[in-house]
Image (cartoon, helix red, strand yellow):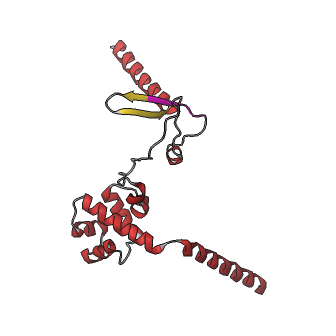
Amino acid sequence: MLKAWVETRAFLLYNKYERYDRYEKYDDKREGIMIAENIRLLRKRAGMSQEEAADIAGTSRQTFSKWEAGESTPDILACDKLAEAFGVTLDDLLHYEEEEERLPMPPKGKHMFGTVTVGARGQIVLPKRAREIFHIEAGDSIIVLGDEKQGIALLKAEEMVGFVQRALKKANEKANEEADK
């Protein structure tokens, strides 16, 4: 029994120090400043007062002011409410750095992956993050659509085929209904 207790304590102690090492590498101060900057920036873009944003987060204006100043950090529930209200992802609210990205924070569900270079034969390499988000893997077929006014769009072929099949099925059902009349 004593041996099991000692082994358990040693395991917990080891994990405590392993977690400490991970947290030591985490730049707490920089993350707090980033959250503060993002909250302030998004509130101003939304045209909200601190009082209005504080109401959404479920806190006082004074506490919200401390969040924006970087003097304290909102809890995860308040961050979730603010991200929803500002129309951004929670991840972007917490981690997005406009200066580093050189692009404004995107709305939730919208992405800007940066630029790609077109090769001599027209080939492009899709950024890794785009491939991950849209589940694009080597060997997938992509349909390229174009509109001279709006630009180019890429769609996974399997999704487009599914869409066309559903549209044709509805058209056939409608034609059959009209023929039965």
Q: Position of residue 35 (x, y in %)?
A: 38, 67
Locate the N terminus and report the quarter of the image it occupies: bottom right
From where the camera sits, is residue 157 visible?
no
- Residue at (39%, 67%) from the top-left corner? 34
Residue 2 appears left or right of 159:
right
Q: Please say if 166 is above or below 13.
A: above
**Magenta stretch, residue numbers:** 139-144
From where the camera sits, is residue 16 visible?
yes
Q: Position of residue 92 (x, y in %)?
A: 41, 58
Locate the C terminus and report the quarter of the image it occupies: top left
- Residue at (43%, 62%) from the top-left corner? 95
Of residue 125 and residue 8, the one placed in the foreground of this image is 125
Of residue 73 and residue 56, the one placed in the foreground of this image is 73
Q: Please say if 2 is above or below 158.
A: below
Q: Position of residue 33 (x, y in %)?
A: 39, 71
Task: State the residue lying farthest toward the bottom.
Answer: 2
Task: State the residue lying farthest toward the front.
Answer: 120
Of residue 150 and residue 116, the one placed in the foreground of this image is 116
Residue 111 appears left or right of 3:
left
In the rendered image, residue 116 lying in the magenta stretch gets the answer: no
Of residue 158 and residue 169, the one placed in the foreground of this image is 158
Q: Position of residue 102 (x, y in %)?
A: 39, 54
Q: Quadrant of residue 171?
A: top left
Q: Quadrant of residue 60?
A: bottom left
- Residue at (42%, 58%) from the top-left corner? 100
Numbered marks: total: 0
